[in-house]
Amino acid sequence: MNLFAFFVQYPGICLAVGIVFLLCYRFALRSRVMLMTGALWCIYAAYEFYMQSSFGCAPECNIRVDLAIIFPLLALSSIIAVIQLIVQFIKTSRRP
């Protein structure tokens, strides 16, 4: 199972990832990218919960073109947010 299929199968993990980014925004790094990334993950988790419900996508819905846009956006924003967090951590750890 690849990482994307894992997130589709378990949207609760996506919600947890979003909460971690929001906590990093609150306590570690006041960055708009961190806030946006946390919000995107939480919104995606809600969207995926909806898609798994009987209202969202029928079981015959095996090709999800929407994920071709969603996953690169989540990946890119997550990478940028993590890089910002690492850079901030390095800057604060070098101060005497």
Image: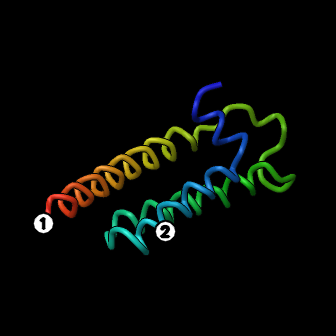
Closer to us: mark 2 or mark 1? Answer: 1
Residue at (61, 52) in percent of width and height:
14
Q: Which mark is residue 23?
A: 2
Q: Nearer the viewer, residue 11 or 56?
A: 11
**Mark found first going from the N terminus, 2 or 1:** 2
Q: Is residue 53 left or right of residue 20?
A: right
Secondary structure of residue under mark 1: loop
Residue drawn at point x = 46 percent, y = 49 percent = 74
**Which residue is pictured at 77% across the width and 53% down the height?**
56
Image quadrant for the N terminus? top right
Residue 80 placement (x, y as % from top left)? 31, 51
Vertical placement of residue 46 versus 32, above or below: above
Position of residue 65 measured from the top left corner of the image (x, y, whole percent): 58, 38
Task: Name the quarter where the C terminus is drawn.
Answer: bottom left
Q: Which residue is mark 1?
A: 96
Residue type marked 2: Leu
Q: Which image quarter: residue 55?
A: bottom right
Kind of residue sitting beneath label 1: Pro
